[in-house]
Amino acid sequence: MPMAYGEWLKDQREQAGLTQQQLAETAIMSRTHIAHIEAGRRWPSHDDAKRLDRALNTGNVLASFLPDKNARPVANHFEAAKQFEQQASAIREFALSCVPGILQTEAYARAVLSVGFPPLTPAERDQAVATRLERSRILADPATPVVWALLDENVLRRPVGGPAVMAEQLLHLADLVDTERIRVHVLPFRMGAHPLFPSMVTLMCFEDQPPIAYVEGLHTGTVHDSPALVERFQDTYDLALSDALPLKESLALLRATAKGYGHHDD
């Protein structure tokens, strides 16, 4: 997000003689959210921008001059979750059908993004792949965010992109586990139905704000911040995790499955 947008918001707030907390109360937002926008770390939603305009008497400026969504090649329903993802201190993913976005290799991401409808143009697909890889840069920090991935065994068995792509993807996950950057636990087929069977979910925790849950379906996605509902998601995740394979067994399954796709260690 261009710093100019956040800087302009800060300038208007200060001209109005408001603290971040006062503006947050007037706009019905959190002070932390205001701080992130002013620092250029987060985009406000369109509704947030309209509330800020009303609170600051700036007409429709903040809502009208939001950065172009075309410059942010992610699905509209994922935009809010993407912003939270970059700020989280801990991320717990559950994936039912494919590897979570921040853990995908370039080839795997390209395969996933090649089958949507309506189909992306080659240029749009290249841009979407680049954005997905950019998201994964949060793993460059050796410790933060803490990342756990709970994977249905289906994620390992479906040959997205073909055997070579899958072997590379599974070894990428295994390498991240070996370096203790992430934890991966697999829910094996033999468990049958499990508590998270209906859909994928991402749980995020933060140092300076309450936790959230993001639930996604086909062409839809919702960020939940109701404390009671987020707690239910967390409890459901923990229940499913209790049925998953331990870390070492999950790692062994990743490597064995990669070998089955045709990878052989030298």
Image: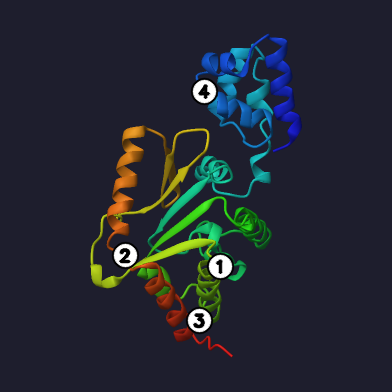
User: Can you give x and y, in whole percent of width and height, for residue 44 in the image?
Assistant: 59, 31
- Residue located at (31% from left, 52% from top): 238
Q: What amino acid is at disc 4?
A: Met
User: Can you give x and y, in whole percent of width and height, for residue 121 in the image?
Assistant: 63, 60
SS assignment at label 3: helix
As measured in the structure, the alpha-carbon distance from the residue carrying label 1 to the one carrying label 4 is 39 Å
As measured in the structure, the alpha-carbon distance from the residue carrying label 1 to the one carrying label 3 is 24 Å
Q: Which residue is mark 1?
A: 179
Q: Which residue is mark 2?
A: 244
Q: Is residue 63 left or right of residue 152?
A: right
In what quadrant of the picture does the N terminus appear? top right
Q: Which mark is residue 29?
A: 4
Count residues near mark 2 (Cα–Cα under 10 Å), then give few for <14, some for 14-19, many for 20+.
Answer: many
Count residues near mark 1 (Cα–Cα under 10 Å), then give few for <14, some for 14-19, many for 20+.
Answer: few
In the current view of this chain or complex, which residue is farthest to the top? Answer: 17
Q: What amino acid is at disc 2?
A: Ala
Q: Nearer the viewer, residue 112 or 246?
A: 246
SS assignment at label 1: loop
